[in-house]
Amino acid sequence: MADKEKSKAKKTAMEVAASYLSNRMRTVEEMRKHLKEKEFSENEIEETINDLIGLKYLDDYAYAVRYYEYNTEKHRGSFRAMRELEEKGVDKQTVKFALEDYLYENKIDEYELALEVARKEEFTEVDDKLIAKVARKLESRGFKRDDIYRVLDEMRRWDNSKLS
């Protein structure tokens, strides 16, 4: 009987947070929203978040770096990841620094990633229809406009006679 009563007892904010973190990393803002939905007081929420940050269970910078890594694996550009991170509540400065560090430490050139996506397109000739299709694809994947224009310029230089 005591076990049933104990299981029905309200969980602490830290227990709820730990359960929420068990599946994947979360941003500070995601955790804050989750704990608010579970009706914890502002004081409990902030105390729990501060404890989790101190324990390094919540780290928006590490989350952003991992998010960029994931996006690169999916052949997506950083522009999309930046927008999504800001939507998840990561502040702009953290988003910017994490991106700069990630690209530098991993020697990633987003132009080369975008060019790789373009080269994977199946085509027999480079024409305006293909150029438009690749432009839309790169934009939807979150590549920066400068990189997209560079890729399109490169594609226009591809020799159609050598493609067949």
Image (tube, grey):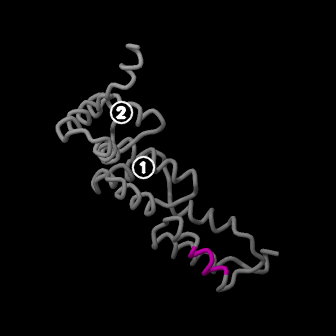
Q: Amino acid at mark 2?
A: Val
**Image-quadrant location for residue 10:** top left
Q: Which mark is residue 16?
A: 2
> Is residue 37 found inside the magenta-colored segment of the image?
no
Measuring from the top left, give residue 76's x and y in whole percent. Answer: 53, 59
- Taking 102 as reference, is 128 above or below it? below
Q: Amino acid at mark 1?
A: Tyr
Question: Residue beneath label 1, please?
Answer: 104
Which callout, 1 or 2, points to the residue nearer the camera? 2
The reply to whether the C-beta atoms of the residues labelled 1 and 2 are less than 8 Å apart is no
Residue neighbourhood size for the residue with mark 1, other residues' Cα within 10 Å, grouped as few (<14), some (14–19), many (≥20): few
Q: Is residue 147 left or right of residue 27?
A: right
Magenta stretch: dominant SS?
A: helix
Q: Residue at x 28, y 34 (%)?
A: 53
Which element type, helix, strand or loop, lies under badge 2? helix
Q: Residue at x 56, y 64 (%)?
A: 114
Write the start and end of the magenta stretch as one range.
130-136
Which element type, helix, strand or loop, lies under badge 1? helix
Taking the view exactly as shown, the residue that stands out farthest to the bottom is 128
The one nearer the camera, 146 or 14, is 14
The one nearer the camera, 40 or 48, is 40
Q: Residue at x 56, y 60 (%)?
A: 113
Looking at the image, tell me whether mark 1 or mark 2 is earlier in sequence order.
Answer: 2
Measuring from the top left, give residue 74's x and y in whole percent. Answer: 58, 54
Mark-to-mark CA distance, 1 and 2: 36 Å
* Quadrant where the image shows the C terminus: bottom right
Q: Is residue 5 left or right of residue 156?
A: left
Q: Is residue 126 left or right of residue 71?
A: right
- Taking 17 as reference, is 63 above or below it? below
* Quadrant where the image shows the N terminus: top left
- Taking 88 as reference, is 146 above or below it? below
Residue neighbourhood size for the residue with mark 2, other residues' Cα within 10 Å, grouped as few (<14), some (14–19), many (≥20): some
